[in-house]
């Protein structure tokens, strides 16, 4: 399994969801985090 951390704002998330084939990506696990949590994850990517 590939884990990737992406930082997207609300507009970027809306654009992404607008074009995806929802059946194809149904197994993706979405986790929404705060700015502070994102900084912590970027500092320690193995914490995922």
Image (cartoon, grey):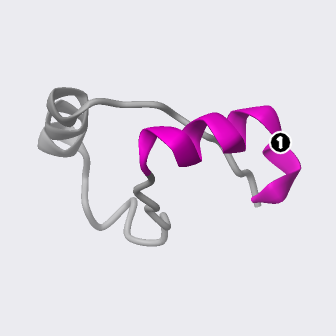
Q: Residue at x 36, y 31 (%)?
A: 8
Which residue was labeled with disc 1? 44
Q: How far across and down, in percent of the image, does residue 35 sit?
A: 45, 38
Q: Residue at x 87, y 51 (%)?
A: 46
Residue 39 falls left or right of residue 16: right
In the figure, 46 relative to 4: above or below? Answer: below
Q: Which residue is the extreme one toward the front?
A: 36
Q: Dot 1, how many residues are within 10 Å of its Cα: few (below 14), some (14-19), or many (20+)?
A: few
> Foreground: 37 or 13?
37
Residue 3 falls left or right of residue 8: right
Q: How far across and down, in percent of the image, does residue 41 sit?
A: 69, 44
Q: Which residues are magenta?
A: 34-48
Q: How far across and down, in percent of the image, does residue 14 sit?
A: 14, 39
> Foreground: 1 or 13?
13
Q: Residue at x 45, y 53 (%)?
A: 33
What secondary structure prevails in the magenta region?
helix
In the figure, 2 relative to 30: above or below? Answer: above
- Which quadrant holds residue 16? top left
């Amino acid at each position: 399994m590939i884990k990737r951390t992406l930082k997207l704002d609300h507009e970027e998330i809306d654009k992404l969801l607008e074009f995806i084939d929802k059946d194809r990506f149904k197994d993706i696990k979405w986790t929404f985090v705060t700015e502070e949590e994102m900084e912590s994850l970027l500092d320690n990517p193995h914490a995922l």
